[in-house]
Every structure is written in structure tokens, then in C-alpha cells.
Amino acid sequence: MSGNDDLDSIRVVSKSVAIKAAGVSSRTWDRLEAIGDTPPLTQLSSNRFGYRIVDLKAWLDRRRIRREDDHGRRTRLIKRMQPNSA
């Protein structure tokens, strides 16, 4: 592991960067946060919080959908994500 990899494992990013990296809207993130379904926060100082990159990666990995494990759900999600064709 190189020095940069070590830093990435502990690097903390702001909420806005975490939202952008996750590819969701701030409204969706706030909804997920309200139900406790976001990566854990890291407190950097009394007024500054963020998300460790390693925690964000782990959270995203837990949300992966494997075709062989949940094909029906994945198919429904893909259909919902496609724009309506009129």
C-alpha cells in the first residue's frame, strides 16, 4: 500500500462531497440520514463533521445488488430508473 492509499483510508470528506461521491441528491441523503442509513459521521472538531472515505466505500459496497442474488429486485430498480418513453 502506498502512502496515498493509507491517507485515503482515513481521509474525511464533507457531507457535500460524500453526497456527490454517492451519486444521490441532498434530499435523498437527508432522508437516508433520518432513518440511520448513511455512513457513520466522524467528528473532527466541536463543529466540524465529515465522512471517512473508507466508511463511504463500505456503505456503498453494502448497497450493491448482485444479479444472481436478487435478480427480480434489480430488474424492478432498473425499470424504475429508466425514463418514461411516451
Image (tube, grey):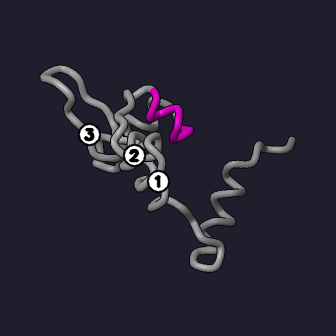
Residue for point 20% across, 33% down:
43
| Label at residue 1 | 1
Image: magenta residue range = 17-24
Q: Position of residue 75 (x, y in %)?
A: 69, 66
Residue for point 18% across, 20% down:
47
Disc 2 + disc 1, Cβ < 8 Å: yes
Q: Position of residue 64 (x, y in %)?
A: 54, 61
Q: Amino acid at mark 3?
A: Leu
Q: Toward which corner of the image does residue 16 lie, by quadrant?
A: top left
Pointer 2: what residue? 6
Q: Amino acid at mark 2?
A: Asp
Vertical arrangement, residue 45 with respect to residue 33, above or below: above
Vertical arrangement, residue 19 with respect to residue 5, above or below: above
Pointer 3: what residue? 41
Mark pair 2, 3: CA separation: 19 Å
Q: Amino acid at mark 1?
A: Met
Is 10 on the left or on the right of 83, as rendered? left
Q: Position of residue 2 (x, y in %)?
A: 48, 47
Residue for point 75% across, 48% down:
82
Sequence-earlier tag: 2 or 3: 2
Mark pair 2, 1: CA separation: 7 Å
Q: Which residue extends farthest left?
A: 46
**Crowdedness of circle 3 by 10 Å Cα count: few (<14), some, many (20+)?**
some
Vertical arrangement, residue 77 with respect to residue 24, above or below: below
- Is the magenta region chiefly helix, strand or loop? helix
Sequence-earlier tag: 3 or 1: 1
**Crowdedness of circle 1 by 10 Å Cα count: few (<14), some, many (20+)?**
few
Q: Which residue extends farthest top?
A: 47
Q: Which secondary structure lies at badge 3?
A: loop
Tell which tag, 3 or 1, sits nearer the viewer: 1
